[in-house]
Image: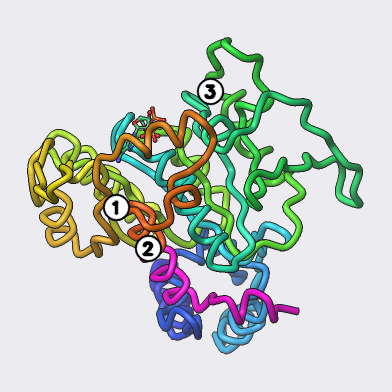
Amino acid sequence: MKDREQQAIQLLKQIIEPNLTNDIVSLGMVRNLRLVDDYVYLKLYIGSHQHDLKDKVEAALSTLDWCKKPYIQVCTIPGVRLTLAISSGKGGVGKSTTSVNLAMALSLSGAKVGLLDADVYGPNIPQMLGLKQSDVQTIDTSVGQKFIPLEAHGIKVMSVGLLAEPERPLAWRGPILHKIITQFINDVEWGELDYLLIDLPPGTGDAQITIVQESPICGVVMVTTPQQVALSDVRRGIYMFRQVGVPVLGIVENMSYLENAQGKRTAVFGMGGGAEIAQELSAPLLGQIPLDPRICSGGDEGNPIALSQPDSIAALTFKQIALALGRTFAIDRETATSRP
Ligand SMILES: Nc1ncnc2c1ncn2[C@@H]1O[C@H](COP(=O)(O)OP(=O)(O)OP(=O)(O)O)[C@@H](O)[C@H]1O
């Protein structure tokens, strides 16, 4: 049986995703591969534009002389091309700040962007985008009721925080947590999106594993601050994602330094931590965001720095990360607007 499984995996490894120029197994698109008698079962996690990969998988597995039939369950979020997760090893390092500003930078580059706040422990994305608690509307569709996302600065937003009562802690546990997150992933009517960013809860617990396993996440951006204690947590996070087969796209180092009016930089939380971990774990350092009080006030006022201060170092760095992601996934202004 193990030999046959290896045979199937080797065949699937020959299928290359043309834009990412990597094979679908390494990209974490093939999951839950099982052999029952002479049948192959697997889940294929893909974006809305990658349905031809299913035919390729079918054709590849059909060449196995012992395989009577492959059963491929395609897992995708309708209308969503790319689902990316933003994660951190520990809380308070600026994960939500990065999610909001990256979403903003991607949107400003011309892409259609959605942001799902799955941080059940501290859902503060709505506030960071200036959204108040409001009744989330639902819509009846052919596949059941769906939530309609709210919109802020051109970004479609859905958050567990929009469903919770203000000032009340979200004390969801175990099965309820699992159900809420799964519902969020599958039951939001996003429409057509180039990117769906998912702001994960901090850490590497059940909630994170559920989300990454049950959604077509094609990559994770890890956020960290430069000090050693944060780095050991981010290392654990990266190992976790690699273990469940989700590629780590790179690391954003936040609160890297504080710059004074004369341009002198002080490394408040130490220097070079992000670069060190990036090198150690062979994950690119996507950018370094300085400490800037305008990031904090922008978050509190619902006006992200990527929009309000486009010439700031922080905004330019988020823009550069957005462009890098666009290049990686071959989504640029042209493809975003000319999409069928
Ligand atoms: N580079 C920065 N400069 C100044 N303030 C920042 C910076 N990054 C984040 N902050 C502020 O730090 C606080 C924590 O940031 P944020 O909520 O993004 O962290 P988080 O990692 O998402 O936290 P949690 O895990 O608790 O959700 C916020 O008030 C935010 O405005």
Q: Nearer the viewer, residue 162 or 211?
A: 162
Callout 2, which amino acid? Answer: Ile
Provide the secondary structure element on which disc 3 rests. helix
Marks 2 and 3: in contact by CB < 8 Å? Answer: no
Horizontal and vertical percent position of residue 339: 70, 78
Question: In the rendered image, which residue does mark 3 sit on?
Answer: 174
In the rendered view, does 247 fall on the left or right side of 112? left
Which comes sooner in the sequence, label 3 or label 2?
A: 3
Query: Sequence order check: which comes first, mark 2 or mark 1?
Result: 1
| 254 within the magenta span | no
In the rendered image, the residue lying farthest to the top is 168
Question: How many C-alpha atoms fall within 10 Å of the one at disc 1: few (<14), some, or many (≥20)?
Answer: many
Count neighbours of disc 3 (C-alpha within 10 A) and say few if under 14, some if 14 to 19, many if 20 or more: few
Real-space Cα separation, disc 3 to disc 2, in angstroms: 35 Å
Image: 86 above or below 275: above
Q: Does mark 3's beta carbon lie closer than 8 Å to ligand 1?
A: no
How far apart marks 1 and 3 lie (CA) works out to 30 Å
- As helix, strand or loop, the secondary structure at mark 2 comes to helix
All told, the count of numbered labels is 3
Residue at the disc numbered 1: 252
Q: Which residues are magenta?
A: 320-340
Q: Are marks 2 and 1 in contact (CB under 8 Å)?
A: yes
